[in-house]
Amino acid sequence: MVTIEFQAEVIPAACTGCKKCVWVCPTEAIHMEDNIAIINKARCVSCQNCHGICPDDAIFKEERAEPLVLGVDYKSVDQDQIAEICRNSNIHPMQWLCLCTATRCREGAAAILQGAKTPEDIALMTGVRSGCTVYCTMMSLRLLKGAGIEVVKPPKWRWYDTTQTLWEFPEELKETYEGYFLDEDKDVFRKF
């Protein structure tokens, strides 16, 4: 479970309507009305992306009246299906989905089994992407692809696609990195 105690707030008089905040929001909580950023508080996970990118200092963080609690009980879904999604993603279920929130990949897979179809859905169900929003976006995309869900990156949005893993490492380079345990590491990830 992730507890979100803050939310973003816009100073309308300072907002110039640049839309940069819209494109970095990990939960699609921001939209524009009359060239002013509007934040859907129910979707805000207080990641600070909007505040950090705003060139006009028009967004600040304020404490929520009631904390927003997000989380998925991975035990509530079929464990074999979690394992299958993770295996297809070349991810161990106990691997970190989000380091900032200490959320495991099994929770992300469970969110997918409960209906998540995008990284934003996974974030709103699990609370991931409320910190740096980079690593967990990549891991969420890998899980979605492993579940057979085709995800199309929206234009101008800050999504960082999957990085190279052990499974994409070229075979011909293995000899170059003698002393590394690339095949042995693959075996460890397959033991679940």
Image: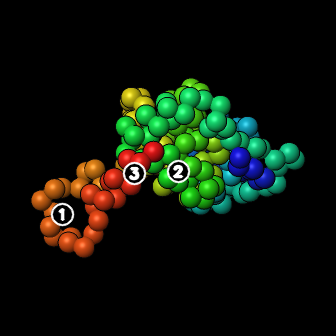
Whole-angstrom CA distance, mark 1 to mark 2, is: 26 Å
Farthest residue to the front: give it. Answer: 191
Which residue is nearer to you in this view: 147 or 53?
A: 147
Name which of mark 1 and mark 2 comes first in the sequence: 2
Query: Does 123 appear above or below 182?
Result: above
Tag 3 and tag 1, C-beta contact below 8 Å:
no
Name which of mark 3 and mark 2 comes first in the sequence: 2
x and y percent of residue 102 in the render?
62, 56
Name the image quarter holding residue 188: bottom left
Residue name at image x 53 percent, y 50 percent: 94
Farthest residue to the bottom: give it. Answer: 179
Residue 115 visible somewhere in the drawing: yes
Which residue is nearer to you in this view: 180 or 24?
A: 180
Residue position for label 3: 189
Residue position for label 1: 174
Whole-angstrom CA distance, mark 3 to mark 1, is: 18 Å
Which residue is nearer to you in this view: 144 or 39?
A: 144
Residue 9 visible somewhere in the drawing: no
What is the three-letter code of the residue carrying label 2? Met
Residue position for label 2: 94
**Helix or strand or loop: what does disc 3 sit on?**
helix
What is the three-letter code of the residue carrying label 1? Lys
Tag 3 and tag 2, C-beta contact below 8 Å:
no
Q: Quadrant of the C terminus?
A: top left
Residue name at image x 20 percent, y 72 percent: 178
**Helix or strand or loop: what does disc 2 sit on?**
loop
